[in-house]
């Protein structure tokens, strides 16, 4: 991607960022280190702040203290308070200032403490960051990243558990990323920071410290015992807009992202179904080719996400699959989602679309 | 538990001992502020105190913000009622600068009149004017421009509203291109993406106008923060009307300005009207808009917005303070929206028709003209020549712009333009939608 090919870009704009290396190139040739998703996100920020002086990181409690989830820990000590700092409790100010900084020529990475708190800053994302390029004919841009933890499973209740991804995928001009593991989180965050467009980077907080398959009553698994916690050192990217096939299969395609990726794996095993599980990783732009090729092969599709169902991202996925794969479908496209209620504390595991519900959907689709 | 207080004191503390001694009001009702005069009544601006030009002291640009707080309730003025300059804020401008200011104001006034005409002729979707408040944008743009390193990313930037077209004129934007944007024709660099008047001309220090109100204010502060992060002596100037100070973004901007002390200037143009809502609906009857800066510990100035010299001086002060590393300033510009809000508005429905003529601070063009004549720098025939020259320039530009088409005729905007610039590189789903359209 290069903005300097754009005939409308005037000469006074700052030079575009150096082209990102390909996804397989790493600065430290094959060396890896065990990291949690938190550490991988922090490492992505540190790598980019060391590489590019324009990268700055800020948010509520995100400076000196390093963030309530520790994703920015040590950045202020390492890069100085001008590049990693605390902000007032003002999401409109955080995102609004980020828009100003990005259009000035910096590469701000703003942290919203919980996605549930983003709404005061939503106008700055939707009306400002997303449209600045379009409304200035490409002369002004907002290459910023807004990071925020999403999802439940942590006993957070309705104000610490929401999954508002569909509120961002509905907006022209945004890119929306939702990684499910440390390797993806680091590579996707670096790609997001280097991306010339505003990126909403959603971090499933239940996965911060380990993979989670929805069996909340079983012992917690740390990333140190999972291969996806073995993160390459240095700089590497995972391109935005590319899904990954987690598990190849022949009978049914499961479309998932974030926490539901691991839930789907467990559910397929428990249902004894040869499912092809796709982790979308980027929701916008969507890797619809990978999705359509899979459903064309399997003829069945189950969509799983934690967000509420009505007008959720699953509805978009369902429409895309129907438009592209109608002739291949052997069963109705089925969604397994959070219910259209506020996210409860006491009934969290009823609300959460766990492996039992996903497995039941798989059985139904196979029996159709 | 309040058992240690004497019974007399407790009784006094709990009683309704009102100042007038009459106790509580007979009714507790919602207070909805109303302007002093409505249609059919005589204009009444008695609420506006107009102090003499020598009342407002001018603190040093590095003075603590607290030294400016008295300036939030007075009015910084340089031109007196007879057009003579005086007082601590007299910037002592040379005749060339004053004359340039007059020309920019006249061009702004004239071209905006033409834009209204184009709208009425169906050649433009929309138009707005800054009639009566041209000195605000023009004096500010010229004052920032004195020591500006230039405009654009990494440099100075205004984040204007639709009422600051004077910045474009003062900073030398092409009048032809300005008109093309109003006509949404092929000469519009935005290719019809934005409503008329919502220009984007970064090289003239004119940030893309959103159309959502006050969103630009934290962006201007963020711009200034970026300059401070990089150690550059740039300014980010945010603009809003007094009505949109009610938006949360105004307060977010001032909190960030207060906390990080960036080289930012937040300008509140109090032109008394937000469409049909008078400034009291934004809280202006209980405190000045400048006073809101005091709560944030930000330097505050309240300036006669129809006084070109005062506007210039206030902006120079704030700019020097910002570039010097002494922090942000809030400026309230007291002026009057003499025209309708927009081509879609009829102010005779909510205020006396003769309001603008009765405005105590007069007309900015007339006041600067009077000053220049008083100085002996202009004669009446010079003034006529300047007016005529402004008109000729504007009419020539409008004619040239019209030759590139208007909203409803002769433009050759391509549907492809709609899909351009949504992203740096067009993603597959947009390519697909463009192809559905046949392109």
Image (tube, rainbow, N blue to C red):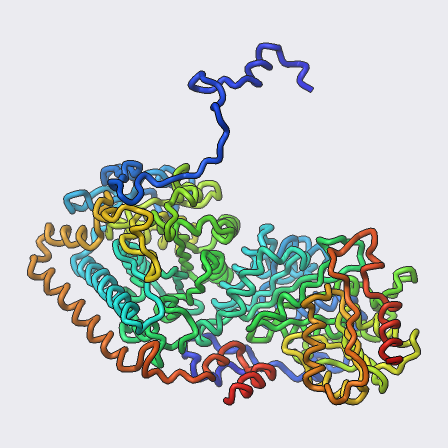
Is residue B78 placed above or below A248 in the rendered structure?
above
Q: Residue placed at 41% from the left, 39% from the top?
A: B33
Residue B147, visible in the rendered structure:
no
The quadrant in which residue B74 appears is top left
Q: Residue placed at 9% from the left, 61% from the top?
A: B382
In depth, the one of A330 and B59 nearer the eye is A330
Is residue B50 placed above or below B3 in the rendered structure?
below
> What is the x, y in percent for residue A344?
78, 54
Residue A16, visible in the rendered structure:
yes
Q: How many marks?
A: 0
Would residue B6 be found to the left or right of residue B39 on screen?
right
> What is the x, y in percent for residue B26?
48, 23
> What is the x, y in percent for residue B163?
34, 59
Would residue B37 be found to the left or right of residue A193 on screen?
left
Q: Residue placed at 80% from the left, 54% from the top?
A: A155
Would residue A6 be found to the left or right of residue B175 on screen?
right
Would residue A294 be found to the left or right of residue A50 on screen?
right
């Amino acid at each position: 991607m290069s903005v300097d090919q754009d005939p409308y870009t005037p000469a006074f704009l700052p030079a575009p960022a150096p082209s990102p290396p390909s996804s397989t190139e790493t600065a430290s040739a094959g060396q890896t280190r065990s990291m949690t998703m938190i550490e991988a996100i922090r490492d992505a920020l540190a790598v980019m702040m060391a590489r590019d002086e324009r990268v700055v990181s800020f948010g509520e409690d995100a400076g000196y203290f390093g963030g309530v989830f520790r994703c920015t820990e040590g950045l202020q000590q390492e890069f100085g308070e001008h590049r990693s700092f605390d902000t007032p409790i003002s999401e409109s100010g955080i995102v609004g200032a980020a828009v100003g900084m990005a259009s000035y020529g910096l590469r701000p990475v703003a942290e919203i403490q919980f996605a549930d708190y983003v709404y005061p800053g939503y106008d700055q994302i939707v009306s400002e960051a997303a449209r600045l390029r379009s409304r200035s004919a490409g002369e002004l841009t907002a290459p910023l990243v807004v990071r925020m933890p999403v999802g439940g499973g942590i006993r957070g209740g309705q104000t610490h558990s929401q999954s508002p991804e569909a509120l961002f995928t509905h907006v022209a001009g945004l890119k929306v990323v939702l990684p499910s593991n440390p390797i993806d989180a680091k590579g996707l965050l670096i790609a997001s920071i280097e991306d010339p467009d505003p990126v909403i980077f959603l971090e499933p907080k239940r996965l911060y410290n380990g993979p989670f398959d929805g069996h909340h009553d079983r012992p917690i698994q740390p990333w140190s015992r999972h291969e996806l916690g073995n993160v390459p050192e240095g700089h590497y990217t995972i391109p935005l807009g590319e899904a990954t096939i987690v598990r190849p299969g022949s009978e049914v395609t499961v479309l998932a992202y974030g926490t539901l990726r691991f839930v789907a794996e467990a559910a397929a095993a428990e249902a004894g179904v040869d499912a092809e599980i796709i982790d979308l990783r980027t929701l916008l732009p969507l890797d619809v080719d990978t999705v359509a090729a899979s459903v064309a092969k399997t003829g069945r599709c189950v969509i799983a996400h934690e967000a509420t169902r009505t007008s959720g991202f699953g509805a978009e996925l369902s429409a895309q699959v129907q438009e592209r794969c109608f002739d291949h479908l052997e069963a109705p496209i089925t969604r397994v989602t959070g219910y259209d209620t506020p996210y409860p504390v006491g009934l969290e595991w009823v609300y959460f679309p766990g492996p039992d519900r996903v497995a039941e959907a798989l059985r139904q689709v196979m029996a159709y | 538990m309040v058992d240690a207080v004497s019974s007399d004191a407790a009784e006094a503390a709990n009683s309704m001992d009102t100042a007038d001694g009459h106790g509580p009001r007979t009714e507790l009702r919602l207070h909805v502020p109303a302007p002093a005069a409505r249609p059919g009544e005589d204009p009444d601006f008695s609420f506006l105190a107009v102090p003499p030009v020598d009342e407002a002291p001018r603190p040093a640009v590095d003075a603590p913000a607290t030294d400016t707080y008295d300036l939030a309730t007075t009015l910084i003025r340089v031109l007196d009622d007879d057009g003579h300059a005086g007082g601590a804020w007299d910037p002592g401008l040379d005749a060339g600068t004053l004359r340039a200011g007059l020309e920019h104001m006249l061009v702004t006034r004239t071209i905006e009149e033409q834009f209204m005409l184009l709208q009425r002729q169906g050649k433009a979707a929309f138009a707005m004017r800054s009639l009566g408040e041209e000195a605000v944008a023009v004096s500010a743009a010229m004052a920032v421009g004195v020591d500006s390193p230039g405009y654009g990313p990494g440099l100075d930037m205004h984040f204007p509203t639709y009422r600051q077209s004077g910045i474009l004129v003062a900073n030398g934007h092409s009048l032809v291109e300005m008109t093309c944007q109003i006509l949404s024709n092929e000469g519009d660099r935005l290719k019809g993406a934005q409503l008329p008047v919502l220009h984007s001309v970064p090289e003239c220090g004119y940030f893309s106008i959103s159309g959502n109100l006050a969103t630009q204010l934290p962006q201007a502060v963020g711009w200034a923060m970026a300059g401070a992060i990089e150690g550059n002596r740039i300014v980010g100037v945010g603009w809003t009307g007094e009505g949109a100070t009610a938006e949360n973004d105004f307060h977010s901007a001032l909190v960030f300005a207060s906390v990080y002390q960036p080289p930012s200037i937040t300008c509140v143009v109090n032109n008394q009207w937000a469409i049909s809502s008078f400034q009291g609906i934004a809280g202006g009857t209980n405190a000045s808009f400048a006073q809101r800066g005091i709560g944030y510990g930000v330097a505050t100035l309240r300036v006669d917005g129809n006084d070109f010299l005062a506007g210039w001086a206030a902006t120079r002060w704030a700019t020097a303070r910002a570039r010097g590393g002494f922090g942000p300033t809030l400026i309230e510009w007291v002026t009057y929206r003499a025209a309708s809000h927009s081509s879609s508005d009829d102010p005779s429905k909510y205020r006396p028709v003769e309001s603008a003529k009765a405005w105590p601070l007069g007309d900015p063009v007339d006041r600067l003209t009077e000053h220049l004549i008083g100085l002996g720098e202009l004669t009446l025939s010079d003034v006529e020549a300047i007016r005529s020259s402004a008109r000729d320039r504007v009419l020539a530009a409008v004619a040239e712009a019209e030759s590139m088409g208007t909203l409803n005729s002769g433009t050759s905007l391509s549907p492809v333009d709609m899909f351009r610039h949504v992203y740096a590189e067009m993603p597959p789903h947009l390519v697909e939608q463009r192809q559905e359209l046949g392109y």
